[in-house]
Image (cartoon, rainbow, N blue to C red):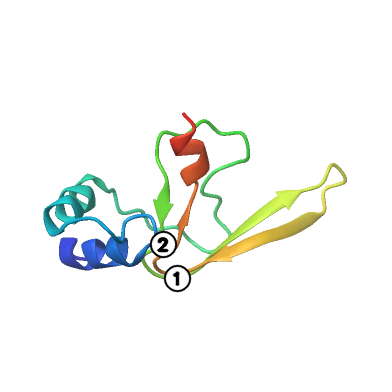
């Protein structure tokens, strides 16, 4: 995606909607685009994180595994949605 496309996705998110044009450009420049394959894990519960994810394209599934190994779907996120922000903002 181009920097302008990334900026537009960021500005559609609720947390970044009020950014000025220059702030959105600056934030988009800080981002690192990462492609994730279907079935690949992005992060694990309890991982320490200094960053969050904004979905640019596609969907991601958030799951929790029970002690018995069963997988429970917690949420789905799609383009323009953010996940992982709680860990990043809580330090």
Q: Name the mark on residue 36.
A: none
Q: Residue 18, how many percent across, how many down? A: 27, 58
Crowding at dot 1, Cα within 10 Å, few <14 / some 14-19 / many 20+, comes out as few
Return the residue found at the far front. 18
Distance, label 2 to label 1, CA atoms, is 7 Å
Crowding at dot 2, Cα within 10 Å, few <14 / some 14-19 / many 20+, comes out as many
Residue drawn 82% across and 48% down?
Answer: 69
Residue 68 vs residue 29: left or right?
Answer: right
Which secondary structure, mark 1?
loop
Front residue of this view, candidates 66 and 10: 10
Return the residue found at the far left. 22
Which secondary structure, mark 2?
loop
Q: Name the mark on residue 58.
A: 1
Residue drawn 45% across and 71% down?
Answer: 58
Q: Is residue 12 above or below residue 33?
A: below
Residue 19 vs residue 89: left or right?
Answer: left
Residue drawn 44% across and 37% down?
Answer: 89
Q: Residue 51, how many percent across, how many down? A: 40, 40
Is the N terminus in the top left, top right, bottom left or bottom right quadrant? bottom left
Q: Residue 23, how many percent across, how many down? A: 17, 50
Residue on which disc 2 sits: 55
Tell me, yes or no, whether the two marked residues, 2 and 1, touch with CB atoms within 8 Å.
yes
């Amino acid at each position: 995606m181009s920097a302008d496309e990334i900026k537009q996705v960021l500005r559609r998110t609720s947390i970044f909607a009020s950014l000025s044009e220059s702030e959105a450009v600056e934030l988009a420049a800080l981002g690192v685009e990462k492609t994730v394959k279907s079935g690949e894990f992005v992060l694990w519960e309890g991982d320490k994180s200094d960053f969050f994810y904004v979905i640019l394209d596609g969907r991601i599934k958030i799951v929790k595994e029970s002690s018995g190994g069963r997988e429970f779907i917690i949420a789905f996120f799609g383009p323009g949605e953010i996940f992982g922000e709680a860990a990043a903002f809580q330090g």
